[in-house]
Amino acid sequence: MSPQLPDLSGPPVSLTELTAYKDSVTQQFGAIYTAIDGLTPDSLDLSLVDDAFSGLKTVRNIVGHLGLDEARSNAERVAGMAYGAMQNARDVVSLIGQLPTEVAALESMATEAFDNISEILPSLPMSLEDLSAFKDTVFDQFGAIGDAIGSFSLDSLDLSLPGDIFSGLTNISNITGLIGLDDVGAYADKAVGMAYGAMQAAQDIASFIDEIPVEVANLGDMVMDGFDQVAETIAGLGDAFDELGDVPDLALDLAAYNPALDTRVGNLIPHTGIGSFGEVLFQVSAEKMALVRDVQRTTSARVEEHQVTGAKPRLEFLAPELDTTGFSVFWHMAFGVNPRTEIAKLRNLCTQGAAKNLILGGENFGKYLLIEVSERWMRSGPGGSPIVAEASLSLKEYV
């Protein structure tokens, strides 16, 4: 067997490419099972063991490339069993009994890992420039829809106009769905249905003329908000890398797409510790990202103002006030953190009134109480769990 490695020049940036990797792994498992089926205690063909070993190495390389460390470790272990049997023919008999179970378990683990990646893989454009191109296309569609609506007249029911609107709305639905704006796509689909109904039944055109301008206006507002959210997400990821200095474009592409950072790109990104609050870590590294932004610290004094007849009041310094600090934290599941878990930690610290040391930028601010946590889910995955989220924190000094 001559295993065919996929092109490992870069990590998958789309579900299509991820599927190609998964297909490669499936092919390797097929070849491994073929080798296993050919092994019998009566016919100890070491070339079949070598075939199984080669297939397992290929599986290990692919899942390791995708950052699936648990599957990679398991593949290495099973490959080690095959390699040991190749070195000592006496081990082949025991390998025959163990290998089918081990390979089946590895296949199940790899399949689950691929499924997990496909669930959280965001379908964002890779750059703000690409997003802008999508946005321009959508605006062109809205322009065409507006022209069609402006041409409507109850005295001249041109059935081609609902068709033009139907076409434009369909394009908007496709584009917004492509970049993950599922709510916008669903709303566009509803308007598409209205246009389709008007195309099929001329008697519905009068009500369609009344309703469609409002629906299109609502859709336009949703599209604008949706594009702004996507742009903010992409820009936020870019800001994260700006904190680290000059990072190659490939790293930014990963930020938009890949839930498992490629180790080769990881080597380009310095490991940077930003700080912590209790058990919650703030950091930007190749493995994890919890980016702190917009830090504000206020130091003030408590004074007494004494009124003076015929002159300005006199101030008396009494004592320093408690410092207050505020900042936001940005998480992306693609960078090894679960936003929901991190937010839950912060909310628990807030509701428990636990005073913890606040460390930011290498400086220990001292003990603080977390007074308020305001969370914002910027993008959700299947089931509604946040993939990208931000929390604004308000803290007060504790003495």
Image (cartoon, rainbow, N blue to C red):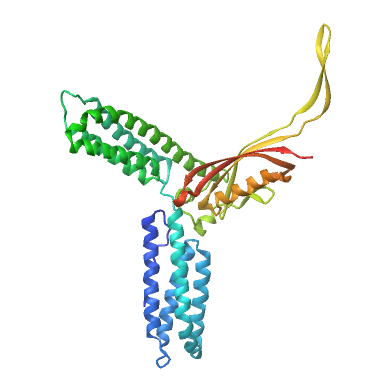
The quadrant of the rendering that contains the C terminus is top right
353 up-or-down from 165: above or below: below
Residue 391 appearing in the image: yes
What residue appears at the point 37 percent right and 60 percent down from the top-left corner?
A: 19
Residue 26: name its quadrant. bottom left
238 up-or-down from 74: above or below: above
Query: Where in the figure is residue 182, as x and y percent of width and height?
Result: 39, 44
Query: Where in the figure is residue 203, as x and y percent of width and height?
Result: 18, 32
Of 39 and 395, the residue lying toward us? 395
Query: Where in the figure is residue 365, as x and y percent of width and height?
Result: 73, 41
Of 187 and 42, the residue lying toward us? 187
What residue appears at the point 44 percent right and 50 percent down from the top-left corner?
A: 122
The quadrant of the rendering that contains the N terminus is bottom left
What residue appears at the point 39 percent right and 81 percent down from the top-left corner?
A: 35
Query: Where in the figure is residue 386, as x and y percent of width and height?
Result: 50, 48
Q: Extreme top residue here? A: 310
In the picture, measured across the screen, residue 397 lies left or right of residue 18, that is right
Residue 361 appearing in the image: no
Of 162 and 148, the residue lying toward us? 162
Residue 148: name its quadrant. top left
In the picture, measured across the screen, residue 217 lies left or right of residue 10, that is left
Q: Extreme bottom residue here? A: 42
Residue 217: name its quadrant. top left
Count of numbered circles in the view: 0
